[in-house]
Image (cartoon, helix red, strand yellow):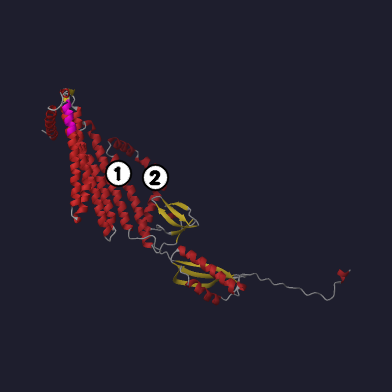
């Protein structure tokens, strides 16, 4: 005797006892059959079992809430989480068994040829118990993740803050997949569906493993860049790590996706035959694919070169195609440059391998800015150098490294002054140069207006003859 027969026998005995008990008190009209061998007393027995199930539900709820209230303070939170995880699955389990005990005695009294309802009821019982168990385990994983997250929040390291969500996502992926795989035999489907079920189970496992690998890569990215802040002024190391991690992470995502698709396709015999046919013409297909995907492959390999050699990094300041901007995004095929006026320039990765460009933050974010001013030859350079000193040294954008003023060029009309000043990064350098230019020109206008660039003109007057020309007089 299996478990189903044992439960059915127990339910039938309970139903017979209740039916005989109700039959002693029912009017004679209720002694007639309702349908086949099912009497009205049997229906009352089923309703009484459901009422008893409701009483068990209520008693269980009162018991659980009482245990939570009477728990010690140091155990109250743990017990509350465990009870909250188990209450709803337990209630559903109670009602599943209650409906089974109420309905199976009625199914037993159906005609002998009506076996399908009894089989369906047995399968629903098995599925209900399995789903309740799966639901209970899933709720325990949520509570486990919440408890671990609360513990991680108290620790000083950020590693556990990233690993705890990974553990939770992994459990939420694996447990349903395993639950579905283990519950498929309960359905006891015909043999003609066995192959489809086997392939479906394999695909679920492959997708679950791929999802876990992708989540692991994402968490690995966050761990590697967690200690590196891109918002710092001197963020060379952070940009280096960020660029490498992001490019390699995207490459791993693509590799995982391709491997997942390939493994799934290999499960089907039809795809294997197609692959064998394609391999017969691999030479021609290889040549066509190589020509068609030349640029794509070039960008893909350029991505690996950039990740390793790093001619550009995330947030680098660059001059490309005559435009000043920052590297905003690096993908496996293209780079997005954020231009200073909020335009975006999209360039293929191969551009940064094949063409020259300026990288202002390749080795350091610090810059030496230059300002050019044209003045008259009469300007006192040494006095101007003394006036320039407070202009630069009192400016918070100057990084205290170096500044200078020199005569860098001279023409037939003016001489050129070059002012040099260092700053921490390109944005500060631009603002610093603009401010120095404004203040120094204001100094020239206030103290040496005669030294501003001007055009000299000399008039040469010819002497006038004392005697008028006689020819003109005529």
The number of discs equals 2
Q: Quadrant of residue 365?
A: bottom left
Is residue 374 among the parts visible in the rendering? yes
Magenta stretch, residue numbers: 39-48
Magenta stretch containing residue 124, yes or no? no
Could you say where residue 143 lies in the image, as x and y percent from the top left? Answer: 24, 50
* In the image: residue 287, left or right of residue 190: right
Residue at image x 30%, y 57%?
223
* Alpha carbons under labels 2 and 1: distance apart: 23 Å
**Mark 2 lies on residue:** 290
**Mark 1 lies on residue:** 260
Quadrant in which the N terminus appears = top left
- Residue 236, compared with residue 182, is above or below; it is below
Kindly indicate whether the residue at mark 1 contacts the one at mark 2 (C-beta within 8 angstroms). Answer: no
Q: Nearer the viewer, mark 2 or mark 1?
A: 1
Residue at image x 45%, y 52%?
347
Magenta stretch containing residue 46, yes or no? yes
Residue at image x 37%, y 56%?
243
Neighbourhood count class around disc 2 (C-alpha, 10 Å): few under 14, some 14–19, many 20 upward: few
């Amino acid at each position: 005797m299996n478990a189903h027969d044992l439960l059915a026998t127990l339910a039938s005995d309970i139903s017979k006892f209740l039916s005989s008990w109700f039959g002693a008190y029912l009017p004679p009209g209720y002694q007639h059959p309702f349908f086949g061998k099912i009497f009205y007393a049997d229906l009352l027995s089923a309703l009484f079992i459901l009422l008893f199930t409701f009483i068990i539900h209520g008693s269980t709820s009162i018991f659980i809430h009482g245990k939570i209230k009477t728990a010690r303070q140091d155990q109250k939170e743990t017990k509350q989480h465990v009870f909250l995880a188990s209450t709803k699955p337990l209630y559903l389990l109670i009602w599943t068994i209650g409906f089974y005990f109420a309905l199976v005695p009625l199914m037993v009294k159906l005609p002998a040829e009506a076996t399908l309802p009894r089989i369906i009821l047995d399968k629903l019982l098995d599925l209900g118990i399995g789903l309740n168990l799966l639901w209970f385990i899933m709720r325990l994983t949520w509570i486990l993740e919440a408890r671990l997250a609360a513990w991680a929040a108290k620790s000083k390291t950020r590693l556990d803050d990233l690993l705890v969500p990974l553990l939770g996502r992994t459990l939420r992926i694996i447990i349903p997949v395993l639950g579905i795989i283990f519950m498929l035999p309960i359905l006891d489907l015909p043999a003609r569906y066995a192959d489809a079920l086997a392939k479906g189970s394999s695909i679920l496992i492959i997708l679950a493993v791929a999802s876990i690998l992708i989540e692991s890569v994402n968490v690995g990215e966050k761990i590697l860049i967690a200690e590196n802040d891109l918002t710092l002024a001197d963020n060379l190391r952070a940009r280096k790590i960020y660029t490498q991690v992001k490019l390699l992470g995207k490459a791993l995502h693509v590799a995982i996706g391709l491997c997942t698709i390939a493994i799934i396709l290999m499960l089907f015999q039809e795809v294997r035959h197609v692959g064998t046919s394609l391999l017969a013409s691999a030479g021609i297909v290889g040549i066509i694919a190589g020509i068609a995907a030349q640029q794509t492959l070039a960008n893909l390999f350029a991505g690996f070169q950039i990740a390793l050699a790093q001619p550009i990094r995330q947030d680098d300041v660059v001059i490309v195609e005559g435009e000043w901007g920052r590297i905003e995004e690096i993908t496996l095929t293209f780079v997005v440059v954020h231009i200073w006026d909020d335009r975006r320039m999209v360039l293929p990765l191969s551009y940064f391998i094949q063409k020259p460009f300026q990288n202002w933050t390749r080795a350091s974010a610090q810059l030496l800015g230059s300002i050019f001013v044209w003045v008259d030859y009469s300007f006192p350079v040494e006095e101007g150098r003394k006036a320039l000193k407070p202009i630069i040294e009192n400016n918070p954008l100057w990084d205290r490294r170096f500044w200078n003023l020199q005569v860098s060029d001279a023409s037939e009309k003016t001489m050129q002054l070059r002012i040099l000043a260092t700053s921490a990064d390109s944005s500060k350098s631009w603002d610093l140069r603009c401010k120095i230019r404004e203040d120094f020109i204001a100094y020239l206008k206030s103290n040496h207006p005669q030294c501003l660039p001007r055009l000299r003109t000399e008039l040469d007057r010819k002497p006038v003859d004392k005697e008028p020309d006689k020819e003109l007089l005529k």
